């Protein structure tokens, strides 16, 4: 049975939004891995770059999450919302950690 046009379009849009979100989540993972490798020789500019990029990606992720949530039914919404909140909190902690590392770098 074919889906009505609106549902098919919504399904395709949801699929594409989820792919974009997975891509952005992968970018965050790359940045966190790089930040974890920072040493005493890491320049302040590198800290600033990674922290700013992390903020940008987090903003895009939150926007994507909102778009996705508009398309989900009630049964999927709660589980997705909870997972997104966990990811956002993890990302905010990582930004805070990077900020702390920058402060330590500046004090040396």
Image (spheres, rainbow, N blue to C red):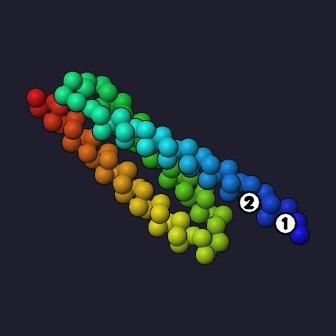
Q: Which residue is mark 2?
A: 11
Residue at figure coordinates x 49%, y 53% from the top left: 62
Q: Which x, y percent locates residue 69?
A: 59, 63
Viewer-side residue, 102 vs 29: 29
Give the CA separation, mark 1 to mark 2: 9 Å
Name the secondary structure under disc 2.
helix
Residue at figure coordinates x 53%, y 65% from the top left: 80
Q: Which residue is mark 1?
A: 3
User: In the displayed image of the protein, which residue is found farthest to the bottom?
Assistant: 75
State the mark number for residue 80.
Answer: none
Query: From the viewer's perspective, is 39 left or right of 64?
Result: left
Q: What is the crowding at mark 2: few (fewer than 14 residues within 10 Å), some, or many (at least 20)?
A: some
Residue at figure coordinates x 62%, y 64% from the top left: 70
Query: From the viewer's perspective, is 90 left or right of 68?
Result: left
Name the secondary structure under disc 1.
loop
Residue at figure coordinates x 21%, y 42% from the top left: 100
Query: From the viewer's perspective, is 26 left or right of 42?
Result: right
Q: Earlier in the sequence, mark 1 or mark 2?
A: 1
Question: In which quarter of the view is residue 39 placed?
Answer: top left
Q: Which x, y percent locates residue 13?
A: 71, 54
Quarter holding the C terminus is top left
Q: Which x, y percent locates residue 77?
A: 57, 70
Q: What is the crowding at mark 1: few (fewer than 14 residues within 10 Å), some, or many (at least 20)?
A: few
Query: From the viewer's perspective, is 78 left or right of 5?
Result: left
Mark 1 touches mark 2? (CB < 8 Å): yes
Viewer-side residue, 86 vs 65: 86
């Amino acid at each position: 049975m074919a889906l009505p046009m609106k549902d098919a379009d919504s399904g395709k849009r949801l699929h594409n939004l989820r792919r974009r979100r997975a891509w952005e989540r992968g970018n965050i993972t790359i940045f966190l891995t790089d930040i974890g490798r920072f040493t005493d020789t890491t320049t302040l500019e590198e800290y600033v770059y990674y922290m700013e990029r992390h903020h940008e990606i987090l903003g895009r992720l939150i926007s994507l999450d909102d778009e996705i949530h508009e398309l989900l039914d009630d049964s999927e919404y709660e589980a997705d919302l909870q997972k997104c909140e966990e990811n956002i909190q993890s990302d905010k902690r990582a930004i805070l950690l990077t900020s702390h590392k920058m402060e330590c770098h500046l004090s040396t």
